[in-house]
Image: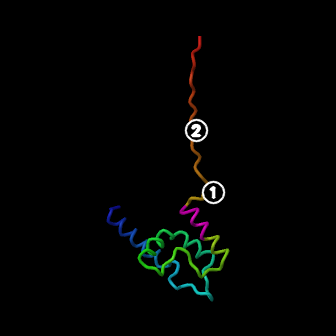
Amino acid sequence: MSKRFICLLLLMVLITSAGCVPGDGKHTAEKPAGFFWGIWHGWIAPISLIWGIFNPDIRVYEPQNTGWWYDFGFYMAIISGFGGISLTRRKSKKTVVQTSSNSN
């Protein structure tokens, strides 16, 4: 794949993911953000942080949320990132080095 295609794809992903940033007015007291929104907002937190520098209405964390479940999803996504908490990990091969000592 060409570098131009990869850059275009990355730009499209960033624009699409930024469409659901916390603090955009989508969530209200009657319809607060829940667990899955917490996961999503945790994943896009770096984008929200950078965008929040230029737009003071954008937040890293959605203030209109359901409480504990939103917090749990948000922090789970922040901690795990994209695959940080993996249930299956590759086991590294340990190499054993033998040293021979000639003590005569």
Query: From the viewer's perspective, is residue 97 above or below residue 22?
Result: above
* Residue occupied by mark 1: 87
Q: Quadrant of the C terminus?
A: top right
Check disc 2 and report its element: helix, strand or loop: loop
Q: Hey, which residue is sitting farthest right in the picture?
A: 68
Q: Which residues are magenta?
A: 74-82
Query: From the viewer's perspective, is residue 71 above or below residue 1?
Result: below
* Number of numbered labels in the structure image: 2
Closest to the observer, 55 or 19: 55
97 sits to left or right of 56: right
The residue positioned 56% from the left and 30% from the top of the image is 97
Q: Amino acid at mark 1?
A: Leu
Q: Quadrant of the N terminus?
A: bottom left
Number of other residues with Cα within 10 Å of mark 2, as a class: few under 14, some 14 to 19, many 20 or more:
few
11 sits to left or right of 41: left
42 sits to left or right of 2: right
